[in-house]
Amino acid sequence: MVLESRYTEDPLDRSLLTSLRRSLRVSLTMEVSWASPYDKPLLWTADAVVGATTWWLDGQPGYFEVLADQIRVICLE
């Protein structure tokens, strides 16, 4: 997995990842790295999908509908 580096907040992300691994919610063998959005410009696509999904959940489906054929929604309870 490649995470967008937020520079000053990277230690918080690492701490969260460690907690998720300890609770076995994330595989201990999953490789994770941080990258600069300047080096990996397509990192913004995840933000776009999350934004469209959040708006869809809030009753504004326009952007989500544009992406609907390209994504798969998994509902967890």
Image (tube, rainbow, N blue to C red):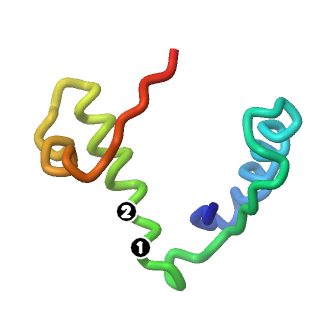
Residue 5: where, in percent of width, then height? 63, 67
Q: Residue at x 61, y 62 (%)?
A: 3
Asked if 36 appears above or below 27 in the picture, the reply is: below
Q: Residue at x 50, y 82 (%)?
A: 38
Placement of the N terminus among the 4 image quadrants: bottom right
Few, some or many C-alpha atoms within 10 Å of disc 1 (few <14, some 14-19, many ≥20)? Answer: few
Asked if 18 appears above or below 34 in the picture, the reply is: above
* SS category of the residue bearing label 1: helix
Residue 24: where, in percent of width, then height? 81, 33
12 to the left or right of 5: right
Q: Residue at x 18, y 24 (%)?
A: 59
Residue 20: where, in percent of width, then height? 77, 37
**Numbered badge on residue 25:** none
**Numbered badge on residue 42:** 1
Q: Amino acid type of disc 1?
A: Leu
Q: Quadrant of residue 68?
A: top left
* SS category of the residue bearing label 2: helix
Q: Residue at x 61, y 65 (%)?
A: 2
Few, some or many C-alpha atoms within 10 Å of disc 2 (few <14, some 14-19, many ≥20)? Answer: few
67 to the left or right of 75: left
Q: Label 2, label 1: how many angstroms apart (C-alpha)?
A: 6 Å
Residue 41: where, in percent of width, then height? 43, 78
Q: Are marks 2 and 1 in contact (CB under 8 Å)?
A: yes
- In this orientation, which residue lies closer to the viewer: 28 or 8? 28
Q: Return the residue found at the far bottom.
A: 39
Check disc 2 and report the residue beneath it.
45
Q: Return the residue found at the far top.
A: 77
Q: Amino acid type of disc 2?
A: Thr
